Image: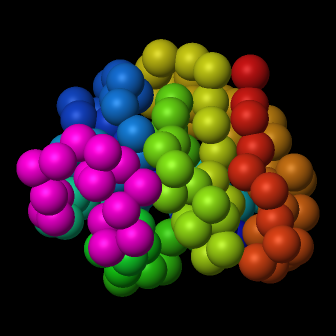
């Protein structure tokens, strides 16, 4: 099975320290046969819907906008150090993967090594759970 993976990084080297939906950019990769192949970098074109911090985090509109951006690139797997409350919405359509590392290279290694678990989570459909990789 081939999957498309989006890694949240502002600079292509380090993972962001914020929630997935707050990244400035996403590195898009194809995961297949135990390898990740870089496809492109996309800019997060979604906008914050509110200046109120409480409203921003977990905002359904934000989840919808980020989800639409990911769907436009046929992404199935979301990788970041953190996800906010919208993880409960995103998990219905994507496999959110929380990684316990700081760099894109280390995240890539974790994703490749967990390919079977990620595939199983994706195949579970809307009832899937997010994954945590160390």
Could you tell me how many numbered marks the image carries?
A: 0
Q: Quadrant of the C terminus?
A: top right
Q: Is residue 58 magenta?
A: yes
Quadrant, the N terminus = bottom right
Q: Is residue 94 above or below residue 50?
A: below
Q: Is residue 31 above or below residue 54?
A: below
At a point 57% along the width and 55% down the height, the residue shown is 87
Residue 14 % position (x, y): 35, 23
Can residue 99 be seen? yes
Residue 85, image x, y percentages: 52, 50
Q: Say which of 35 and 45 sits in front.
A: 45
Q: Quadrant of residue 113?
A: top right
Q: How was the colour assigned to the protein in this rendering?
A: rainbow
In the rendered view, would you say 22 is above or below 110? below
Which residue lies most toward the top here? 102
Q: Considering only vertical position in the picture, is 92 above or below 114?
A: below
Q: Is residue 8 left or right of residue 85?
A: left
Q: Quadrant of residue 46?
A: bottom left
In the drawing, does residue 43 fall left or right of residue 74?
Answer: left
Q: Position of residue 112 (x, y in %)?
A: 72, 42
Q: x and y percent of residue 84 in the render?
A: 48, 44
Residue at image point 51% right, 30% down: 81
Q: Using the image as rendered, state which of residue 106 and residue 79 is in the foreground.
A: 79
Q: Residue at x 23, y 35 (%)?
A: 10
| Residue bounds of the magenta highlight | 47-62
**Which residue is more in the foreground, 25 or 46?**
46
Residue 26 in sight: no
Q: Which residue shows up at 22% across the image and 31% down it?
A: 11
């Amino acid at each position: 099975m081939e999957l498309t993976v989006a890694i949240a990084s502002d600079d292509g080297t380090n993972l962001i320290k914020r929630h997935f939906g707050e990244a400035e950019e996403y590195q898009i990769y194809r995961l297949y046969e135990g390898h990740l192949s870089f496809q492109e970098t996309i800019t997060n074109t979604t906008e914050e819907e509110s200046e109120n911090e409480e409203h921003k985090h977990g905002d359904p509109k934000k989840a919808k906008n980020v989800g639409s951006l990911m769907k436009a690139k046929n992404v199935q797997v979301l990788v970041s150090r953190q996800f906010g409350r919208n993880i409960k919405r995103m998990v219905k359509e994507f496999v959110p993967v929380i990684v316990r590392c700081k760099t894109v290279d280390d995240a890539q290694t974790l994703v490749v090594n967990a390919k079977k678990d990620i595939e199983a989570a994706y195949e579970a459909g809307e009832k899937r759970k997010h994954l945590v990789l160390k």
